[in-house]
Amino acid sequence: MSTSQLFYLADLFGVAVFAITGALMAGRKSMDLFGVLVIAIITALGGGTLRDVILDNHPVSWIRNDTYILVATLAALGTVVWVRMTRPIHEKGLLIADAFGLAVFTVIGTEVALQYAMPSSTAVIMGIMTGVAGGVMRDVICNEIPLIFKKEIYATACLAGAVTFVLLRMLETPHWLDTGVAMLVVLGIRLAAIRWRFSLPSFHLLDRE
Amino acid sequence: MSTSQLFYLADLFGVAVFAITGALMAGRKSMDLFGVLVIAIITALGGGTLRDVILDNHPVSWIRNDTYILVATLAALGTVVWVRMTRPIHEKGLLIADAFGLAVFTVIGTEVALQYAMPSSTAVIMGIMTGVAGGVMRDVICNEIPLIFKKEIYATACLAGAVTFVLLRMLETPHWLDTGVAMLVVLGIRLAAIRWRFSLPSFHLLDRE
Amino acid sequence: MSTSQLFYLADLFGVAVFAITGALMAGRKSMDLFGVLVIAIITALGGGTLRDVILDNHPVSWIRNDTYILVATLAALGTVVWVRMTRPIHEKGLLIADAFGLAVFTVIGTEVALQYAMPSSTAVIMGIMTGVAGGVMRDVICNEIPLIFKKEIYATACLAGAVTFVLLRMLETPHWLDTGVAMLVVLGIRLAAIRWRFSLPSFHLLDRE
């Protein structure tokens, strides 16, 4: 199996994991089955779509290849069936899978921007956006303050991974190496943050209104 | 009057109805007159704009033809005047008009995607998006959980209509026929759902956090 | 210094001011440092990005020139440091700076649309969108009903300024004149609204559900 095939599989895995987090959030809001499906798809594909629209990268990924929609749909339906069977949700397993999805999406987003000959700063932003925008859309539609702004280090892991990827590409390391290392950076930081509950200092401004 | 002229009128009717639902929601939030106008326009044109941006279909409809903005504006102002005159709002009439607008938008969205030679699955998604995204934007900006995820069958009617349209186009039926039948499917399902309060089972996940 | 250089500096000033309003809102929500940064950047650049994506004006401003991201980042970090040092926030000064930023963004948005040979109505909408959409995104993500729909005349000032700009361009006045007058219209209306608490009548619809 080639590196690019492996990467494609990892991408689909990321889509499935993000769709599951979307379906679970929709379940917390007691949405109907169709709502669950829509939130799952938006969570899984929203970040990449926003990136592609801003970069003018058409057709966007899930239009080019309808496997993405299919995988997100199956993951959402599988989640509903699983929960209905009153199987427990392995929260820690889900967090770890989510960290893996985040790593894949961040590296893909950064790489797409670099292919468009974007400056490094834009590529880093696109990497972060691809990783986190889907989750932000999920939370905004479900009327929650986006989780990423509240919890342990999350988007900061994307930032570190995207910067790592850009630096390694400047050094022209082999593709499997820069991809792998950048993903490990995201994954490592995120897992450490979960394990030891790292967080950035928060900025609390008293409301004087 | 030709089929395409009829269809254009139906489209403008859909814009007006969606603008009214936007204005009414803005009124529930006690927005000022300008806020009412903006929410009305976003509700009426948001779905089509999102579709066009994702499909890279430029210029988007309301830029190509400013009648759309004009119709949405007049519908919103008319709503404010009507309510100020303490005239009752005929809720059932509004729901039926909304179902009609939903039918038109869904078919238009599906057709635009097919004209771009998109695969069937993408065309169906574009149809649903055109039908419901404006209402989702209205609800998100007004800080409500989008109605479509909560109430009787709504987006599911779009799904059925869009699938019907795609299938009929494969059979190469005349344009007035596939358009008409697909619209009737949306309209029929939605009206039946309103009349008998059909709903999809909801997926309720207890929050264990 | 040429007019266009002055205008560019005014644009960067607008970016900084809007970033500060974003950082302060994020602080009210006790977000972490990264969240503050992201909200600041979205507030400062969201309106222009939405305009460019809808107009198909690529690459969008902050991709073409990474000074924008840099200025928004520095303004956000400066805000956090300032507040941490428990320095007071001069609310009135901030409102006046915000009015200035609004004036610049509105005129830029209108001008970009006219350069694309858009009809006048579209240009006006693009001007308003550039001025206010960033703030709407900030408020939606932070789970607030957008301020612009609630407070004293705000978007209406953009409307007046954009219309003024379009009319002056039709008269083919010199560039510094139409730009300057349109900005003064926005600034004047907004400052008068703050000073004397002008507001549009609100549309209050009792909820009968």
Image (cartoon, coloured by chain):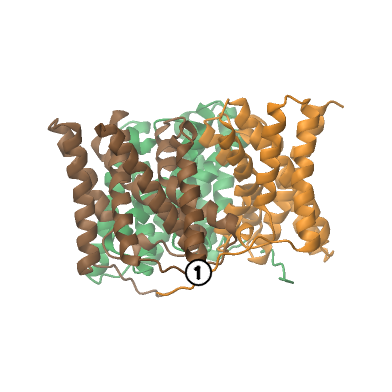
Chain colours: A green, B brown, C orange
Foreground of the two, B56 or A109: B56
Q: Position of residue C79 (x, y in %)?
A: 76, 56
Dividing the image into 4 quarters, which one contains the N terminus of chain A? top left
Which element carries disc 1, helix, strand or loop? loop
Residue B111 is drawn in which quadrant?
top left
The three-letter code of the residue at mark 1 reads Leu
The picture places residue B164, in percent across and down from the top left corner, at: 18, 43
Mark 1 sits on what residue?
C205
Q: Is residue A43 visible?
A: no
In x, y percent, where is residue B151?
31, 66
Residue B103 visible somewhere in the drawing: yes
Classed neighbour count for the residue bearing mark 1: other residues with Cα under 10 Å, few (<14), some (14–19), many (≥20): some
For the point 59% across and 28% down, the residue is: A170
The quadrant of the rendering that contains the C terminus of chain A is bottom right
Identify which residue, A206 or A104, lies in the foreground. Answer: A206
Q: Which of C92 and C37 is in front in this view?
A: C92
The part of the image, by quadrant, that contains residue A27 is bottom left
Looking at the image, which residue is at 24% across and 44% down? B162
Vertical position of residue B14 compared to residue A66: above or below: below
Q: Where is residue C187 in the image (x, y as percent from the top left)?
A: 78, 47
Residue drawn at (48%, 65%) of the image: B83
Q: Which chain carries label 1?
A: C
How many marks overall?
1
Instruction: Judge whether C69 appears above or below A153 on screen.
Output: above
